[in-house]
Amino acid sequence: MTWETVVGLEVHCELATKTKLFCSCPNEFGAEPNTSVCPVCLGLPGSLPVLNEAVVEYALRVGEALHCRVPETSIFHRKNYFYPDMPKNFQISQYDEPVCVDGYLDIPGVGGVPRDAGGRVGIERAHIEEDTGKTLHVGAGGRIHDADHSLVDYNRAGVPLMEIVSRPDIRSSEEARAYVTELRAVLEAIGVSDVKMEEGSLRIDANVSLREEGTEVLGTKVEIKNMNSLRSLARALEFEVARQAAVLAEGGRITQETRHWDEEAGRTHPLRSKEEAFDYRYFPEPDLVPLAPPAEWQERVRASMPELPSARRRRLVEEWGISDHDAGVLLTSGLADYAGAAVAAGAPGREVTNWVVGDLLAYIHGGHARAPGVNETGADRSDLALTAEDLAELVGLVGNGILSRPLAKEVLAAALAGEGTPRQIAAARGLAQVSDEAELVAVVDGVLSASPAEVARYRDGDEKERKKLRGFFMGKVMAATKGRGNPQVLNRLLDERLPAG
Amino acid sequence: MTGTDGLVGRTATELAALVRAAEVSATEVTDAHLARIDAYDGGIRSFLYRADAEARERAAEIDAARSRGEDLGPLAGVPVAVKDVLTTRGLPTTCGSRILEGWRPPYDATVITRLRAAGAVLVGKTNMDEFAMGSSTENSAFFPTANPWDTTRVPGGSSGGSASAVAAGFSPLAIGTDTGGSIRQPAALCGVVGVKPTYGRVSRYGLVAYASSLDQAGGLATTVADAALLLEVIWGHDPADSTSIPTVPEPVRPTLEDGVAGLRVGIITELTETDGIQPEVAAAVEAARAILEEAGAEVDKVSVPSVEYGLSAYYIIAPAEASSNLARYDGVRYGLRRQAADVGTMNALTREAGFGAEVKRRIMIGTYALSAGYYDAYYGQAQRVRTLIINDFARAYEHFDVLLSPTSPTTAFPLGAKVDDPLAMYLSDVCTVPTNLAGAPGISVPAGLDGDGLPLAVQVVAPALHEAVMFRAARALERGFEFTARPRLGAS
Amino acid sequence: MTSRITRADVEHVARLARLALSEEEIEQFTVQLAQILEHAANVEALDTADVAPTAHPIPIANVMRPDEPRPGLPRDEVLAMAPDAEDGRFRVPRIVDYGDTPNPGDYSDPGREEQC
């Protein structure tokens, strides 16, 4: 029996509007507790919500970017439950008439191989809802469950969120990462959110089930919560899939439940001992009226869409002649604009990409292996001491033969450390590549005359022997030039000066 | 009239004119009414909060403005009592409940802002059934209010404090709120005019919510003209209320005296030819018919069948919305708190202690009606019945301009008579609830006294947004009934 | 569909609604709620198959406001209303599993809760 992984993701995204969803309090991160509140977001008796038009604008952008249909009208519902961080003890959300439905997101091929489904993940719906306040649990134990009391801050209460729900089209943890990465990039590109998982402006819940390969019927799904990074997401999904497979292998049944990902322990555990669907007693929000965005508004949104990541990737592949994979990495590295600026300063796109995707990303990730994806740790991109123009300069130096690639790497490192521009560093360190023909001829001749035995073996040797000796000569010559000899020129000179076989 | 200086018992229209003409000062007007309240409110208990100091201060401001030659608002110097369900910044606002005892809101309701801008002088916050749930003001957590016409009887509810204040001459105007009849029914029982405008006419910002899709603030006064004046001050679009009607309301006063010649009036059979309507109330409706016909109206019967289901639909929709609206009273951010070791228990103990029986009943009904498995059968069905009612009214309005019915099936009943029988109490709203469900305007007009000296009244309702024709018909009835009697009050 | 509302129903609903009813209230409400619901349920009889529900009596749509910040309430005024406050925040007793809502820590939302 082979099991197919079936994953759907629910992504909550905080919208970066200036004010909250239903009141004019500033939507700011990090303000002093309870300093951005008013009767509405505190839910004071008599207060009433009024919808922020920028939230609708952003919702329409999301709908457009995710190829959703915007139904003629959508309405708000109340989701009723008691929790101290919810001032009204209900959340204004959308239930069965959301603002966006039936879209999709194409994700770039995972591992370079396009999925047979065309890399398309269906988007069931996207809707608007208000965020809750924040609670600080105070107590000796240091864990939420050991708290003595709690302290509530309502600054965040009423901040606008969009919840984007995918169809269960995701088939692996890699695809899940790719989906979130791409979705993040799209949301950032359309300017609706700063999508920082570490700050909570992007949150993920997953629904995971297994089904027999080849069947249509979905298995029992388990909801996974508390994955606060892409890495957690992948690890949690992998764990859960393995857990479910083990249960099924023993002939057991999967319990429909919500499970919590424990990052430290590396496992999910159930949140409550029995399955229970909460009774939220949804009903239409009587204090709000339906939302029916006019066609002109939707047209305007359509017309003002920026270049989305998928279109940009395609363009870079075409214009710069780079691979799909590199284009994807570039876009998720956060350095795409930077690379574009380097190209604008005159460097070829392909070269720029190689440097960015290779050396710069390695630097940013602190020396770890190159990893495509969101910059989850590491230096802020804007802090790079090497400007885009500098990079173009470096690429130019290599292209003109002034620096060899290995030396260019040395220069790059120095520039990133803040020693100056590439030109300045190369000059200061005397690293300029030697391409002067006369000088190199002298070096080559010197080396050859110092190694007569090897020259003879070269003349008489077979292809394999000649190749090996060629490396020997090149090494000697490079050493003689302290690594600064222009390899192309040296190769040509060796060709000319070594005896033919 | 027992006012010492002839200012008590005057209409708001008269008082505003006197103040504007500088024939009398706002301070004199205010003092006269505060004195009357001092003299007689002990026996009525219309007020939960007496705003004497604030009232005098405001009156002084009005007088200063007038002496500076500034423009005065249409209600300058006129005392107004406000039901304690509207937020008044810095003044207690309890909604008749222990759970908000002592709470002073940090903001004014839009209605309050508009009253202040018009120069009105707020004399106090009036008693009410807790969170506007009730028809007798006996559900106030603090004390019941008496009917000025007979202090052994109820003033009606939930705006009993406001209705009795106007009836007793404590202020010529009062603000009430009406979700199922809570302005009109107490107005009827207290012999004053009470008007509920079209849903969305008056801002609900600062109106502590009971049932959001039904609540509407409105006015009580001794004359139709005064009620019109008050309504025109407080109504109009408010961007802070998303359900507020965006269009400017057509003023009602210009056409108030235009008469009813040719007006088509329909008497709702389901609300007149039914058991439970006190005979004298039915007779009042007949008298109303005669008055209107004599004034040139065409009066006929009309059937609006689904009004019979109004109460049932109302007692699902209103509690459902209320159960959600009242969830915020949990002891966390304001109001009463009963301590406990965990927050859930704290919520439950606080609400148990803070809410009275009727509020708890309606929260329970509402929670049940919305809960999983019951939504469609209860709430969903009730919202569809609401559509039936709206459709039936629309059909009636194809042949009639306004409709006529009793306001309350009975005159004021004795205190304590219905407190133990919720269903009997709910029946008080049978004539008024359909208009709330339809979002339409309704006005109660005094129609005389019954054999026990208790006020009788009739109700005129009109299609949504048609307050002008409704007021015109009400004025014609007022002219015909010539009701000028006032209750005799005992000293407190 | 009209089911008699049982005592168990009343207890369940009371818990959902956070009402710590007394024994007397539970008994009384079980009777009264059944009466009221039975009366209210006569709407069941009506044929509403072709009828859409009315959420709002007056049809209005698209009410919005501009995305412009305005000052809210000063914190001291806000906390002055609080039954209990600490460190600029509203203080409540500890949150435990009440069985009908998500729990502390249930959220994939690093911003919702913190320990200290």
Image (cartoon, coloured by chain):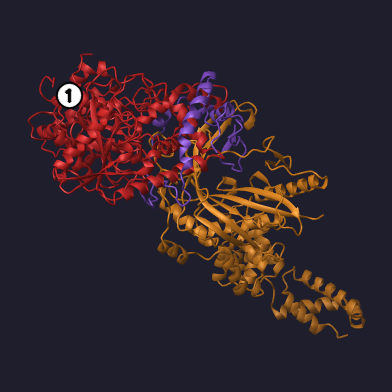
Chain colours: A orange, B red, C purple
User: For the residue labelled by badge 1, is the local secondary structure a helix, a strand or a loop?
Assistant: loop
Q: Is residue A386 left or right of residue A452?
A: left
Vertically, is C52 above or below B11?
Answer: below
**From this viewpoint, which residue is outermost toward the top?**
B492
Vertically, is B48 above or below B13?
Answer: above
Vertically, is B71 above or below B426?
Answer: below
- The amino acid type of the residue labelled 1 equals Arg
Q: Determine if residue A93 is in view.
A: yes
Screen quadrant of the N terminus of chain B = top left
Where residue A484 appears, as percent x and y from the top left, is 72, 70
Q: Residue at 78% of width from left, 69% of height from top?
A: A479
B1 vs B411, nearest the viewer: B411
Q: Quadrant of residue A45?
A: top left
Screen quadrant of the C terminus of chain B = top left
Where residue B206 appears, as percent x and y from the top left, is 35, 36
Q: Quadrant of residue A462?
A: bottom right
